[in-house]
Image (cartoon, rainbow, N blue to C red):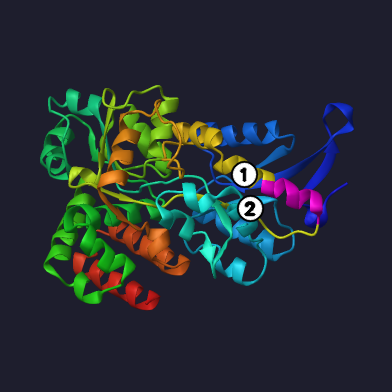
Amino acid sequence: MKASFLIGATVTCLAGGVQATEIEVTHWWTSGGEAAAVAEFAKAFDASGNKWVDGAIAGSGGVARPVMISRITGRDPMGATQFNHGQQAQELVEAGLMRSLEEVAQADGWRDVVHPASILKSCEIDGQIYCVPVNIHSQLWLWLSNAAFEKAGLPVPKDWNELVAAAPKLREAGIQPLVIGQQPWQAGLVLQNLIAAVAGPEIYGKVLSEKNLEAVDGPEMAKVFEALQTARELSTGSNVQEWNQATAMIINGTAGGQIMGDWAQGEFAIAEQVAGKDYTCLPALGMGEIVSTGGDAFYFPKVDDPAITKAQEDLARVMISPEAQVAFNLKKGSMPVRGDVNLDAANDCMRKGLDVLANGAIVEAQDQALSADASTQFNDLMIQFFNQPDMTTEDAKAGLKDILEFDS
C-alpha cells in the first residue's frame, strides 16, 4: 500500500516477516562516475533493512531542481531529495514542507565530526539542521590531459598561465586548448575559478559573498576580466553540451584543459585513468592554495507516516556514517564531510584537496554565496558571454554588478 503522498511503500522483504520500508530518493547523478558513487549509498541503505528506490533525473541540477520542488509543493514528495549546500531549499523549509533533522544530528554528534563547520551551517536555518551534507565539492579545479600535451610536444602546465601559453601549439596539434560545455553553470564555474585564482580569496569573498561593488571595479578584478576574455578565446571551438562530455575530451586527449569541480574525478575513475599519470589536477588553476566548500546534501520532505519518518532517519544516518562517506566519496571524487574517516585509498587529487582544506584558504561556493535566483542569473550571464563574441568584458562586469546588487 502506498504511503502518504505516494512517497513509498512498506513491504515485507526480510526473513521472519520483518518489515522494510522503501523510499524514493531523487537526485541528478546520472553520469558514469556519479551513478557508481550513488550506488554506494543505495547499497548501504538497503543493508540497513530498508529499500532505496532510485529517482534519478537526467540532466544537471538546474533541470532536476524544478521537478523536485514541484513535486514537494504539489503534495507528491519523494522520501529524500538532493540539493546543493546553501540556499536552494530555504523557501521549502520556511514553508514548513521539509523536516528538521536536529534531533538526529544532536543524538549522533554531527556538529562534532563535520569539518569544516561551515558545511553543516549550510544545512542550518534558525538553529535547526534540515539536511545531511554528504560531501565537500570544491568547484575550483583545472583538469589537464597529459596525453594532449605529450602529443603537442609540451610539458604539462603547472598553472593557468602556462595553459594559456601552450594554447597555440595545442591548436597546431589539433587539440582544443580549453573545453567548456553549453550548460550555463559550466560557464559560471569559469568566472568563479578566475576570481579565486587571479584575484585571490580575499577579493573572491568581497565580490561573491559580500557583494562589494567597489571590489568589482578594482584592479584585481580588471585582471580577472582580462583572463575571462582569454578563456573565451581558448574555448572557441568547444562543441559539447554536458560537463561529462567535456571531461571525456580530457580523457581521450582531444582537449588540453577543463575548468570543472572535483566531481570530474568520478569520470576519470570510470575510465581507469590514474591521477598524476594520465591526468593532472590543479586546485585554484594552480595559482594558489584555495578550495571552495560547496557540495551536495539531502533533504527530507515532511510526511505523516511513522514508517517513512523512521526510514528517513535511517537514510540520513547511513549517508553520514564513516563507511558510506568513504565508499561514496572515493567514487564521486569529492571529499568526505567527516574529519574522522580513514582515507588511505585517496588518490593524488583528493589528497591535494584535503591538504588545501587543512592548510589553505576556504571560500564559499557559488550556491552558498548567492541566492538561487542570483546564481541562475550569474550562470546565464556567463554562457551569454562565452557564446556572444561581441559581448565585451565591460558588459560582463556591468551584468555582474547588477546581479550582486540584486542579491544584496
* Residue 309 among those drawn in magenta: yes
Q: Position of residue 38 (x, y in %)?
A: 56, 37
Q: Position of residue 162 (x, y in %)?
A: 12, 40
Q: Position of residue 104 (x, y in %)?
A: 63, 52
The reply to whether the C-beta atoms of the residues labelled 1 and 2 are less than 8 Å apart is yes
**Observer-nearest of 83 and 121:** 121
Residue identifier under label 1: 317
**Observer-nearest of 319 and 406:** 319
Task: Tell me if 26 is positioned left or right of 287 in this view.
Answer: right
Quadrant location of the C terminus in the rendered image: bottom left
**Chief secondary structure of the magenta portion:** helix
Q: Position of residue 339 (x, y in %)?
A: 42, 42
Span highlighted in magenta in the image:
305-313
Point 59% across, 48% down: residue: 108
Which secondary structure lies at badge 2?
helix
Residue identifier under label 2: 104
Residue 37 visible in the snapshot: no
